Amino acid sequence: MKKYFKYSLLVILGIITLIAVAIIVLLTVVDPNRFKPLITKAAYQATGRQLIINGNIAWKIYPNLGITIKQASLSNPVNFGATNFLTLNSVDVSVELLPLLSKHIVVKSFLIDGLNLSLIKKNGINNWNFELPTANPEENKENMDEEESLHLAMSSFGVTHSNFTYNDMDLQHKYFVPNVNLMVTTGFGGGINFDQHSQNLDLAKVELNYNDLIVSKFNLKIKNFSNPEYKGNIEVNKLKLNTLLDSLNIGVVERKSKPLFNNVTVRSKDFNGDKNNVAINDLLISLSDIVTAKSNSLKIKNLAQPNIMGDINLPKFNLNKVLDFLSISNDTRKDKPLLNNFTFSSKFNFTPTQLSFKDAKFNLNDLLSGTTNLQLYNFKALKYNGVINLPTFSLNLVMPQLGMEAPVINNQRLLDKVALNTKFAGTLYDLSLTQLYAKLANSTIVGNIAINSFKPLAFNENVQIDNIDIADFSDINGFRVMLNNLQLKGVGSGLTLSSLTAKQNLQIDNVTVLGVNLDRLVLQLYNIINNAGSNNNDVIKIILNSSQVLQAINSMKTEVAKVIKPGVKDLNQKTNLGKFSGVCAISNGMLKPSAFKLNGPTAVLNGVGTVKLTKVTAINYMINATVLTNGINPIFKQLVFPVTVHDSIDNPKADFNWGSIQQQLIKYSFTTNKSQIQNIIKDQINNRIDPQHKNPNKAVDDVSKGITNALGKLLGQ
């Protein structure tokens, strides 16, 4: 056993000695410059270009055997001028010796220094397309028979102190990338393997560093070079995107002061594809530790006209900070903390002409969350459509966080229960909401709204609001006005109240007032009026003495004042005012309601007038009411109760026209007491001509009727 070990050791030492002697003989006897013609010929056969080596070719021993070529250049095609395609200061190639014996090239390292590469596009032709020189077919056949396929195994590759130029003469675009330093190394057990025969490229445990701007690790396998298929994974631990793009002179002005791109990291556990398609799984992108985007599955189809589809997930991040880093709308977003905490997830599909999000979910500061489907298309003249759903949220909390004041209403708690669901479609200039469903506390809003123009504002709508209580939004002296099925339909335009122009149709199926029983009030007023002048045989007092009429009116005022006085009302009392309809024409902020009618079982109301929708908000409106309460004299139902509404929308005042009421009451008193008046006149005439009433006279009846009728005409009856 000892002899076997001894002989084996001697054999190994002998082989090492022979190799060492062979290397020494090679380095001392063989001048590598003699290979220049062979190298230039091989380059010409491979590229169809002239390779010129002006410097020396020297052997390289450490750390691996190789050669160093100094001062070389490769020419451009004939039509691209006298400049060279590339020049280089030096190239070092280190190879393993033993594989050379079996005609395999195992390159340990390939380092290029001082490379100047000039890429040119001219007349639709690129100077990096190589055309092989024509040769004798027999010679080609012979060469093919003798040719061995190329196999490379490499552990490192580098380009230092190099410059790249791209010149598109057709589009007059020129780019210059100076001082390129690219180092590609492999970790333990890794390598860069290329096999021409099997058409395989295997990059295992590769580490890349470009100018310390990109630092990454990756594995990549490519097979079938004519129709390539590939797979691998990647980890970009450092990508100083701003500095990189600055060095490439790309979008420098647009990215000024946008630190979001100072450091980007990218990771993907798995990607694969071919020359037309790419699939990326478990993708993670982080921008300066401010925002992180995740995708479980991302696919790119047809790279020439890409269609990108997959999912995206943006975990909780500060959208305000992101937009600050992008210098987007800083002033507009001032003091808007709602955007401090934002999440978003969605499936998406992108092509050069459209972008769509499906089943998207978002959350803003745990105050506003929702779902949406959104499609954007025709990017040059943007169009969009989709649907959005906002479950119950609080306007009282959301609006202040957007830098806005929540509307001040009588019942502020109503704004804590708001919800919205609607389809939408539009452009930068118009917007339509269809199948609108909104909820405000217990009230629902459905319908359609179309904004035909934002500037100037032009819109039309067809909206229905159910179960709304006006008292929730404005204090109306303790009353609660319930509206059932409020329908709004109309068109309008104008940016401010002072310039608003519109036409609005209104309809309410039922108006109910809680806090007053109008039938009971009408009966009280009826009794007051009906008792005025009763049991009074003095016709002059009945007809002409206004004191009783004034007394009746004052009594009516007292009763009405009790009803409309601010304060807590008995909400068990209610009045059904019936159906409301009307048309509102608005011209330059002046509201002119017309065809206004409120028709119910207790009363009928109509009115005319104007409301000025400006800061003054002046009201000048007349309402005429008639009552239909059962149990009163039909003549009383002919009375008209005129009311004037004036002052402002914020502080409206209503006054009865008591003068008109007084005049009507006199007529009513005459009509009610007509027979009594006629009898009194008859008795007074008879008393004058026949105090004893011994001879009744028919002429007296006729005279009393005539006088009564004359008085009626005098009083407007």
Image: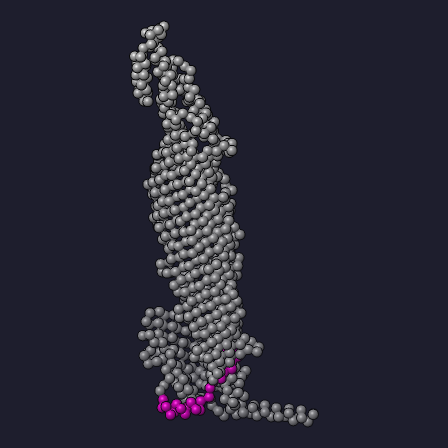
Q: Which residues are magenta?
A: 135-158
Residue at 40% over, 49% down: 448
Quarter the C terminus occupies:
top left
Q: Give the colour scheme of this rendering.
A: one colour
Please give the count of numbered marks on the rendered protein. 0
Residue visible at 41% across and 14% down in the picture: 536
Residue 58 visible, this orientation: yes
Which one is nearer the viewer's eye here, 406 or 584? 584
Confirm whether the magenta stretch covers residue 537. no
Residue at the location (36% across, 91% down)? Answer: 136
Task: Locate residue 147, reporting x and y percent.
Answer: 44, 89
> x%, y% of residue 346?
48, 60
In the displayed structure, would residue 1 be above or below residue 232? Answer: below
Is residue 396 visible in this depiction of the protein?
A: no
Residue 153 included in the magenta stretch of the image: yes
* Quadrant location, the N terminus: bottom right
Please name whichever residue, 239 or 74, is drawn nearer the observer in this view of the structure. Answer: 239
Q: Nearer the viewer, residue 156 or 149?
A: 149
Q: Indicate whether 625 appears above or below 44.
A: above
Q: Is residue 32 above or below residue 224?
A: below
Farthest right residue in view: 2
Residue most extreme to the top? 692
Up-down relation of residue 435 to residue 702 (above or below):
below
Q: Which percent across, then down, holds residue 625?
A: 39, 30
Q: Residue at (47%, 31%) from the top-left corner?
A: 516
Expressed as whole percent of the image width and height from the top left, the position of residue 708 reads 32, 17
